[in-house]
Amino acid sequence: MFKHGFILTIAIFMLSSAFAQLETRSINWDNTDREYLEYLPTSYSGESPVPVVFGLHGLGDNMNNFYNIGMNYIADTAGFILIIPQAETFSAYGQTSTSWNSGASLYGITPNSDVDDTGFLMAVLDSLGTHYNIDTESVYFFGFSMGGYMCNRLAAEVPERINAIASVSGTMGVNFTPEPSETDFVACLHIHGNVDATVEYTGNGSGMDAEELVEFWRSHNESDETAIFYEYTDNQSDGLSFERYVYPNGEAQVAHIKVIGGEHSWYYHPVNDIDYGKEIWKFLRYRFSEEPSSIAETNSNLISFYPNPIKDKLYIDNLSEAQTEISLFNALGVKIDKISINKSGTFDLCNLAAGMYYLRVSKHNGIKTYPVLKQ
């Protein structure tokens, strides 16, 4: 029961970039060696401070599996350092699993209630600050299920260290009493399916209900009581529809994406109408303060492409969803192909020779070039 309760199963196969650095790190905290994955984006040079994004996996999951949701591709194009930590194991009812000390209650127990996960995660953040040029005003956490519970706990416990969180299918644990700061505020996004049978949208026994959590943060952050409503275009035949409620102003923005027909799952493009990873990054960095077409004006890097290295087709997602021209060049600077996309597009490299190629992304506010390795 514990093994699969809040675990995220990934149905996407992706390859790691040949140009970025993915390392397994270890840090000793509370007399225990704790591990985490560290992904350094291709664009990192150390010359200017960059954001840091932590991703927290669900109950029974592990850092290697959760890494496969593909946030590293967004890290490459958006330029943030990605950290995927590993939760500790615990045993109950004859079964062994992994869990954060989030305060969520499961069948009468609070997993790893004696583990200082907040201290561990802050120690990792401190370590990053000594090794890299990080932007301490752009520290973000997101998590799925039990990881989402942990994000909300962190927002209440250490708001002075965190700027925004995004929780997916995980609220505030019933055995954790939040006493958020009256001087430090965290922007919060919560995503939840209304037919989630694991962490119920309404009637949740392990913590707050979804809308109760949203109201908790809205009230604390003194955001507007009336939400700005946005309904995502429904193009995919997936039985789902997505609604966004944004509560602006106040000390920090609060937002909620309600998935009509949504279960305890991680939804992604192009199978679904929205991609959780992209929506999370848009909120963490931009707080949904502008519509996607305007976001493109502030950052020309909002594209994601994969896999890299590549054998045949290169898939491109446009996070800004604004009209974007993308050209493919060979190593000699000869243009091979060109496409113009709003949301997504594809380059077919099947018939091209192995070697280095380059994507040139042209928007009205500038041009960016990215290397692509053809195997």
Image (cartoon, rainbow, N blue to C red):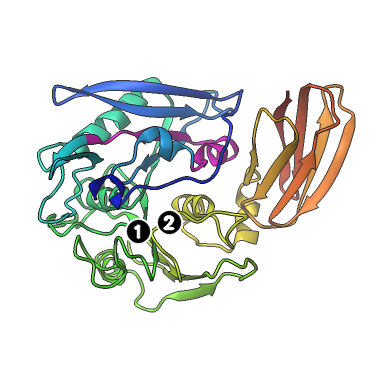
Residue nearest the observer in this picture, 169 or 327: 169
- Give the vertical position of 178 relative to 14 (above or below): below
Residue 69 seen from this side: yes
Q: Quadrant of the C terminus?
A: top right
The residue under label 2 is 265
Is residue 53 highlighted in magenta? Answer: no
- Characterize the local packing of mark 2: few (<14), some (14-19) or many (20 or more) Cα atoms within 10 angstroms: some
- Give the vertical position of 68 relative to 257 (above or below): above
- Give the vertical position of 235 relative to 339 (above or below): below
Q: Earlier in the sequence, mark 2 or mark 1?
A: 1
Horizontal relation, residue 375 to residue 257: left or right: right
Which residue is painted at 23% across and 67% down in the image? 204
Q: Residue furthest front?
A: 94
Foreground disc of the pair 2, 1: 2
Residue nearest the observer in this picture, 19 or 2: 2
Is residue 70 highlighted in magenta? Answer: yes
The residue under label 1 is 169
Residue type highlighted by circle 1: Ser
Where is residue 250? Give x, y as percent.
34, 66
Residue nearest the observer in this picture, 48 or 102: 102
Horizontal relation, residue 286 to residue 129: left or right: right
